[in-house]
Amino acid sequence: MTLDFFIKSYNFDDFDILNIELSNYTLKVEVNLQTHLDLIANGYRPELEMVMDKTFIFKNVNVEKLSFEKPYSINIIEYDNEKLSINVCNKELVINCSNVEII
């Protein structure tokens, strides 16, 4: 997933953050996603409530290792084509966007 797509499609405020790890310049964020889907099928309109656990992996973070304590929080501070600055549990991290991968 590209960083542009992630920034446009997801909001950290919508996540229930289960765990955050940073090691080897890689930030792993485990989240719980809850969603409501309205489906349409030949006049029948079923609804679907989903809960899914997902791990987002951001590579090329400017710090090799940090530990985080609950409560977990993430806020995007700044984003441009060269870097993504985020506040993770009151610690500012910068992710190099030139070769970022979000898995």
Image: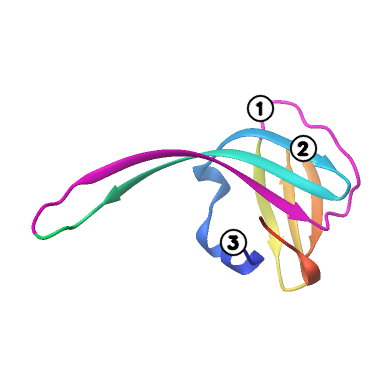
List x then y, in percent, for residue 40.
Answer: 18, 57
Tell which circle, 3 or 2, labels the residue nearer the N-terminal end. 3
* Secondary structure at numbered mark 1: loop
Tell which circle, 1 or 3, labels the residue nearer the N-terminal end. 3
Instruction: Give the magenta-colored segment's residue range.
Output: 43-72
Q: Are marks 1 and 3 in contact (CB under 8 Å)?
A: no
Indicate whether residue 11 is drawn in magenta: no
Q: Nearer the viewer, mark 3 or mark 2?
A: 2
Amino acid at pointer 1: Pro
List x then y, in percent, for residue 83.
Answer: 77, 66
List x then y, in percent, for residue 38.
Answer: 25, 51
Q: CA distance from mark 1 to mark 3?
A: 22 Å
Task: From the image, tell me which residue sits under label 1.
Answer: 71
Residue at the far right in the pictured view: 64
* Secondary structure at numbered mark 3: helix
Front in this rendered view, residue 99 or 93: 99
Task: From the image, tell me which residue sits under label 3.
Answer: 7
Counting other residues with Cα less than 10 Å from the Cα at mark 2, is it few (<14), some (14-19), or many (20 or more)?
A: some
Indicate whether residue 62 is drawn in magenta: yes
Counting other residues with Cα less than 10 Å from the Cα at mark 1, is it few (<14), some (14-19), or many (20 or more)?
A: few
List x then y, in percent, for residue 98.
Answer: 79, 71
* Secondary structure at numbered mark 2: strand
The numbered disc on residue 55 is: none
Quadrant of the image for the N terminus? Answer: bottom right
